[in-house]
Image (cartoon, rainbow, N blue to C red):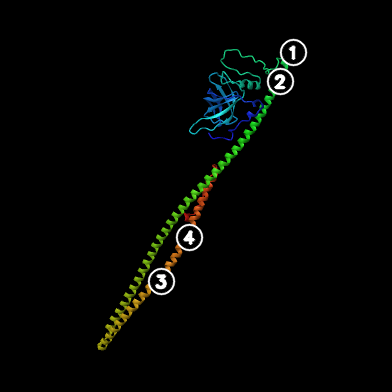
């Protein structure tokens, strides 16, 4: 058990009746310690004393007892018992489940069964109210207290018998006055100790509350940092997957459009060439059927030569147009690539912004849910469908 702020010397040792302490003895006495611990649970355990004196003892216990708590101490051998107050808590040794506490008897006395108590125990007992110390199981009559005289002083003359009632009255008045002083001092000491215990308890509570708040803040900060790191990693993964998916879809669309353009250009060029050849053949057949004679044949020959030349020219023109069409197609592809790149960049930026907004909303919702009290339901974040996709 750690040293608590209550584990300090009690104010009970500062009262006038405790100005003189009795001799301490290293003695193990089997006792029963009972009461309520710091958790409010009743307990009753058999243990032993470590040190005893007229005012109290150091006791071994496994229960959490704080300074100022009332306990009951009972001597197992003699059966004597009494109330005591915990005045000090000692730190437990490493590896041990028990620790020592110091208790002070409410009514000091030799409840430990010490047969030959030290001489100062008698003097302290007399100061505590003129009571002699009870020594159990001695069988002899208690010794009669004799008045002490100073060494070398002449003996006092015997008192007259008639003066005895006056002396007894004076002694009783003195004892009553002394008892009233002792009770008043004890009450003042108890009030002061109670105020100190309350103040120390409040300070300890505030310190523990500050420590708990600080730990809660540290745990919240650590949790937020871990959540932020996880979300950052998730954002990077989503960003990579989104870019990969966008590049794949763009490449597929580009390949489809390119194949469609090339196929359309080839079909158009082939259709135009077939149509031109068919027209020339039809015109040639028509001209041959109408031409007659040598002139017609020469004309036909000339026309065939011309047609051959025209055919060559048409082939050249077709080749030029095909080259021009491919050049225009390449220019159109360059323009399409540029437009496609701008459109992909715009869509990628828009997708990243939507994803980032959605993730920030989820982070805010998670932080609110973490910091919200247990009774409050966390707000459900509004997720953007486009960002989620």
The residue that mark 4 highlights is 349
Q: Nearer the viewer, residue 310 or 34?
A: 34
For the residues labelled 4 and 2, the Cα–Cα distance comes to 99 Å
Could you say which quadrant of the image residue 331 lies in?
A: bottom left
Of badges 1 and 3, the one in the foreground is 1
Of badges 3 and 2, the one in the foreground is 2
Q: Nearer the viewer, residue 363 or 30?
A: 30
Secondary structure of residue under mark 2: helix
Residue 182 seen in the current view: yes
For the residues labelled 1 and 3, the Cα–Cα distance comes to 142 Å
Task: Give neighbour class at mark 2: few <14, some 14-19, many 20+ (Cα, 10 Å).
Answer: few
For the residues labelled 4 and 3, the Cα–Cα distance comes to 27 Å
Q: Nearer the viewer, residue 228 or 389?
A: 228
Point out the residue furthest to the top here.
161
Upstream in sequence: badge 4 or badge 3: 3
Q: Which mark is residue 163?
A: 1
- The answer to whether mark 2 and mark 1 are in CB contact below 8 A is no
Upstream in sequence: badge 3 or badge 2: 2
- The answer to whether mark 4 and mark 2 are in CB contact below 8 A is no
Q: Which mark is residue 174?
A: 2
Q: Is residue 28 above or below residue 336?
A: above
Secondary structure of residue under mark 1: helix
Point out the residue furthest to the front here.
152
Of badges 1 and 4, the one in the foreground is 1
Task: Give neighbour class at mark 4: few <14, some 14-19, many 20+ (Cα, 10 Å).
Answer: few
Q: Quadrant of the C terminus?
A: bottom left
Upstream in sequence: badge 1 or badge 3: 1
Q: Is residue 361 above or below residue 120?
A: below
Residue 389 seen in the current view: no
């Amino acid at each position: 058990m750690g040293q608590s702020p209550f584990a300090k010397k009690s104010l009970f040792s500062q009262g006038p009746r405790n100005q003189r302490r009795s001799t301490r003895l290293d003695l193990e006495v089997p006792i029963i310690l009972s009461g309520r611990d710091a958790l409010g649970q009743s307990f009753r355990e058999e243990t032993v004393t470590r040190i005893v004196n007229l005012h109290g003892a150091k006791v071994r216990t496994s229960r959490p007892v704080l300074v100022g708590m009332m306990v009951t101490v009972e001597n197992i051998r003699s059966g004597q018992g009494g109330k005591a107050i915990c005045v000090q808590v000692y730190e437990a040794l490493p590896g041990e489940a028990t620790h020592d506490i110091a208790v002070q008897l409410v009514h000091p006395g030799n409840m430990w069964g010490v047969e030959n108590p030290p001489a100062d125990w008698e003097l302290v007992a007399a100061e505590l109210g003129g009571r002699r110390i009870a020594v159990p199981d001695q069988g002899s009559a208690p010794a009669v207290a004799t008045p002490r005289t100073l060494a070398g002083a002449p003996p006092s003359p015997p008192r007259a018998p008639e003066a005895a009632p006056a002396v007894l009255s004076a002694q009783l008045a003195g004892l009553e006055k002394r008892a009233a002083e002792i009770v008043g001092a004890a009450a003042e000491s108890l009030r002061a100790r109670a105020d100190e215990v309350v103040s120390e308890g409040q300070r300890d509570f505030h310190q523990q509350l500050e420590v708990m708040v600080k730990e809660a803040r540290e745990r919240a900060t650590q949790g937020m940092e871990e959540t932020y790191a996880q979300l950052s990693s998730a954002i990077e993964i989503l960003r990579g997957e989104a870019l990969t998916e966008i590049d794949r879809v763009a490449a597929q669309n580009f390949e489809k459009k390119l194949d469609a353009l090339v196929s359309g250009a080839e079909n158009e060029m082939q259709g135009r060439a077939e149509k031109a050849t068919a027209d020339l053949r039809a015109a040639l057949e028509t001209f041959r059927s109408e031409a007659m004679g040598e002139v017609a044949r020469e004309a036909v020959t000339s026309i065939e030569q011309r047609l051959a030349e025209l055919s060559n020219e048409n082939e050249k023109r077709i080749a030029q147009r095909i080259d021009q069409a491919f050049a225009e197609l390449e220019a159109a592809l360059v323009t399409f690539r540029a437009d496609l790149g701008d459109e992909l960049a715009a869509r990628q930026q828009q997708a990243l912004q939507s994803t980032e907004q959605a993730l920030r909303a989820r982070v805010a919702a998670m932080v609110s849910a973490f910091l919200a009290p247990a009774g409050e339901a966390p707000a459900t974040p509004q997720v953007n469908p486009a960002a989620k996709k």
